[in-house]
Image (spheres, rainbow, N blue to C red):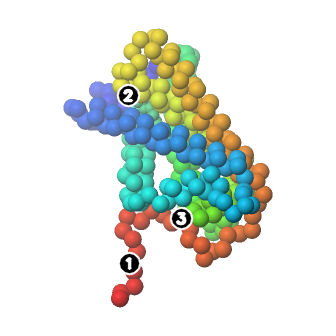
Amino acid sequence: MSTASAASSSSPLRGIAPFLLRRLHSLSGILFGGYVLLHLAVNASLVENYRYDGLPTVYQQQVDKIHSLPFLSAISFGAILLPIIYHTIYGVYILINGKPNVADYGYTRNWLYLLQRISALVLILFIAFHYLAFKGTFNSVLGNEMHFVPSKATESTVLHFQQHWWIGWIVYPIGVIAATFHTANGFYAAGVAWGLTISARAQRRWGGVCVGLFLFATACGLTAVASAMTHKKVPPIDPAIPRVALPQVFPPAGPNV
Ligand code: HEM
């Protein structure tokens, strides 16, 4: 298994701090993992395709519900962004201080330990790309239709994925599998870390549940990707329709009246 941990005696952190920071890392991973599962399940509804009867698609309805939440910026900052930012920063610290040992011990858990770290590195790049691209950050370099338009959820998602073939067929499948593996394997590890799965039998059962979660979440994510790549490409969306911008903690100042 692991041969070194960030909370080991060689850590520059002292006292109770390493334990608490580690628990917070686990908790932030569980919180964000719950969000990832929900996010992929909602995205799988893209399989419905467009509707031509004037009614909103299931995907559009879910997006509308999310965007009508009060204090959306505060919720997304506090419950989604902040946990993943902390998880990433402390995760990098763990990566730097841990030593994989699959060369000496080739057990499944040693490989899963290594894959947890490789998927973490992939996720740093993927989450940054996914988040910033949907906010339109890369529009000038990757094309003008990369941003998400909440009132045209299905159309703008299809345009985002189909901007370049490699976005939908390479970047997203790799990102989805890294996320579902890291989440499911992380849930398994968290069960042990929080003392919920002590016995070998409990670990076997929880392992089965986590494999199920991995398969379900991967199926949802890849369904969403394949749907967005195969639905008909629509014309560019009217630039006058509001897009998603980077979260604003303070709304821009209005005109002085
Ligand atoms: C989809 C996004 C992510 C989710 C849902 C997630 C979730 C989790 C969960 C639930 C754990 C298990 C915590 C425990 O052992 O109790 C974990 C572990 C870990 N995560 Fe993440 N994580 C994500 C992204 C990242 C990123 C971007 C990094 C960047 C470095 C990272 C680094 C790590 C590391 C190093 C571990 C292993 C910790 C250990 O073995 O003690 N994770 N993650």
Amino acid marked by disc 2: Ser
Badge nearest the viewer, 3 or 2 = 3
Within 10 angstroms of label 1, few (less than 14), some, or many (20 or more) residues?
A: few
**Picture coordinates of residue 145, whole percent (x, y):** 66, 65
Q: Secondary structure at mark 2?
A: loop
Lower position in the chain sequence, tag 1 or tag 2: 2
Residue type for callout 3 = Val
Which quadrant would residue 54 be assigned to in this image? bottom right
Q: Amino acid at mark 1?
A: Ala
Residue 17 point in image, percent of width and height: 25, 35
Residue at position x 38%, y 25% in the image: 193
In terms of depth relative to the viewer, which is nearer, 126 or 56? 56
Under tag 1, what secondary structure?
loop
Q: For mark 2, what is the residue?
A: 5
The answer to whether residue 96 is seen in the rendering is no
Horizontally, residue 176 falls left or right of residue 185, namely right
Q: Residue furthest left?
A: 15
Which of marks 2 and 3 precedes in the sequence? 2
Q: Which residue is mark 3?
A: 244
Q: Please name the residue that numbered disc 1 is placed on.
A: 253
